[in-house]
Image: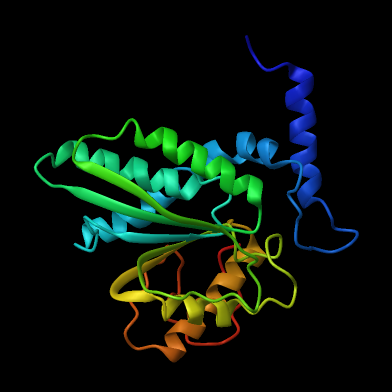
Amino acid sequence: NLIPDEVLTEWIEKIDNLYNNDKEGIKKIDYKGIENIYFFYYFPKNIYKIHRLLRDLSQNGLLKVNPNILDIGCGPGSATIGLLEFYTIIANVIKNTKFEITINLLDENEEFIKIAKLFIDKYKKTLPSNLEVRLKFIEQQTIDSKFNIEQLYDYIIISNLLNSFEVEEKFDMCNFIDKVINSIESDGAILIIEPGDKLSCENLKIIRNNILNKYNNINLYSPCNNIWGLDFSYKCTCF
């Protein structure tokens, strides 16, 4: 049996209405009550986006066999499941290597956390024998100016978080990234995935330029052109 067309139409309309708030200006979205709809619509679209970043790490010899991972704003777990899928492929190829992944989840939305945990627990049952996954902690936490990270991680995932639909207008993205940078191991990585719209791209380039101006020990991997511009403001040339 298929999902009825009228149900799919209703879901699509609700998703479209989330991002059509031009009259009121762009503002943070409240997903309460539509978590399952968001999951069905966006999970398949987002799950494999992290593979590009992990491929960059792998090609540069930086992919760890036993990473401790923090997924900030994990939502329904798309990025984390995508990461596990990538490691599953690697583990099936390199069968004589033992992989051990520790996952920590943070999100404001309790229902999203439940969905993420449910799917990660189910996915763990399909793993090859040389890949072990452990959910260390799962926490409901607001991502705002008071947000803080209290330990070091190998990889910190930030997926679909650093944009105007996900944080309050006064949220200082550069200050947030400073906290994240100070919370990764010296050989760790921050994995950032954001929408490809113009505003999000401009925000990311401002964040990137802030990193280049403040840190001399951070390597950046970016598909964007003019990557080494050092201005604090940046006019996006991709559009």
Q: In the depicted view, which residue is nearer to us: 152 or 90?
A: 152
Q: Residue at 75% across / 32% down in the picture? A: 11
Q: In the depicted view, which residue is nearer to us: 234 or 212?
A: 212
Residue sitting farthest toward the left: 96
Direction from residue 21 to residue 37 in the image, left or right: left
Q: Residue at 85% across / 58% down in the picture? A: 22
Q: Is residue 62 placed above or below 10 in the rendered structure?
A: below
Quarter of the image where the C terminus is located: bottom right
Q: Is residue 193 visible?
A: no
- x%, y% of residue 151? 40, 74
Q: Is residue 184 placed above or below 191 in the rendered structure?
A: below
Residue sitting farthest toward the top: 1
Q: In the depicted view, which residue is nearer to us: 235 or 168?
A: 168
Q: Residue at 63% across / 68% down in the picture? A: 143
Q: Quadrant of residue 136?
A: bottom left
Q: Is residue 34 placed above or below 8 in the rendered structure?
A: below
Residue sitting farthest toward the right: 23
Quarter of the image where the N terminus is located: top right
Direction from residue 34 to residue 24 in the image, left or right: right
Count of labels shown?
A: 0
- x%, y% of residue 135? 40, 50
Q: In the depicted view, which residue is nearer to us: 200 or 153?
A: 153
Q: Residue at 31% across / 70% down in the picture? A: 188
Identify the image's colour scheme: rainbow, by chain, secondary structure or one colour: rainbow
- x%, y% of residue 45? 54, 40
Q: Quadrant of residue 145?
A: bottom right
- x%, y% of residue 178? 49, 82
Q: Is residue 121 visible?
A: yes
